[in-house]
Amino acid sequence: MDHGKVDQVPEVLLSRYEIEERVGVLAAAITKDYQGRTPHLVGILKGAWVFMADLIRHMDIDVTVDFLGITSYGSGTHSSGEVKITKDLDVSIEGREVLIVEDILDTGRTLKYLEEVLSVHQPHNLRVVTLLDKRSRRIVPVKADYVGFEIAEIFVVGYGLDFDQKYRQLPDIHVLRHTPLP
Ligand code: IMP
Ligand code: MG
């Protein structure tokens, strides 16, 4: 790693302006659907926190937030579906209207695991918002209720998304590779 400056990733897939506009639309839809209620947003660390920070600032209803830290076993660049919890929830979700906030859905294994783990705690309902969706890569049949952008089978970084823990701070979403990682 070069400790002087951030590595360049030339190709921008989604600019900060496109992202901001779409996040505003998602937040408006969520605000409408949860009118008069207080959803409990559970952000999945680490990828989703940049998105979640922007999302809640566009929402016009009361919300509460919590975070669940997870890490995939294996290389860390693709998910085996074997997930380890690195930070548990701080407060109970029992009876709450829970909205999982994810950065990206790929094979769907991580979300399936999350839905199983959270359902055990008996939320009133459990929905999902994801900024990005690689729908064509799905192995496990899971679906998000709110999707920012459907993208092709490529590997992207920035706006919270990493490769090997790098590039999370890039304001735009960039294409790191035109093929998914193995
Ligand atoms: P899934 O379990 O295969 O759906 O994988 C979801 C997780 O894999 C995400 O939460 C990300 O951490 C990671 N991931 C999948 N695709 C990408 C990508 O293009 N860029 C960065 N992380 C990705
Ligand atoms: Mg990741």
Image (cartoon, rainbow, N blue to C red):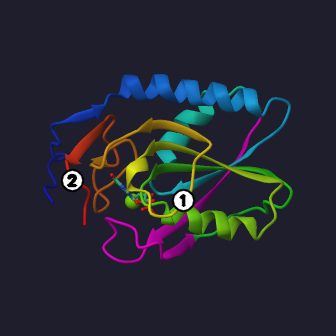
Task: Identify the mark at residue 181; answer none if there is no mark.
Answer: none
- Element carrying mark 2: loop
In this rendering, the answer to whether 135 lies above or below 57 is below
In this rendering, the answer to whether 35 lies above or below 100 is above
Please name the residue shown 21% across and 48% down the image: 176
Which residue in the protein does label 1 denote? 141
- Element carrying mark 1: loop
In this rendering, the answer to whether 25 lies above or below 164 is above
Residue 44, percent from left and from top = 55, 56
Q: Nearer the viewer, residue 66 or 136?
A: 136
Q: Quadrant of ligand 1?
A: bottom left
**Camera-nearest label, 1 or 2:** 1
Residue 137, percent from left and from top = 38, 55
Please name the residue shown 80% across and 58% down the image: 123
Which residue in the protein does label 2 denote? 179
Q: Nearer the viewer, residue 55 or 106?
A: 106
| Relative side of 120 to 59, left or right | right
| Relative side of 53 to 121, left or right | left
Q: Nearer the viewer, residue 56 or 108?
A: 108
Residue 37, magenta (yes or no):
no
Residues under labels 1 and 2: Cα distance?
22 Å
Is the residue marked 1 within 8 Å of ligand 1, measured from its CB? Answer: no
Identify the image quadrant of the N terminus. Answer: bottom left
What stretch of residues is rendered in magenta?
A: 62-86
Residue 143, percent from left and from top = 57, 50
Quadrant in the rendering for residue 89: bottom right
Give the residue type that dot 1 points to: Pro
Please name the residue shown 83% across and 61% down the image: 94
Neighbourhood count class around disc 1 (C-alpha, 10 Å): few under 14, some 14–19, many 20 upward: few
Quadrant in the rendering for residue 18: top left
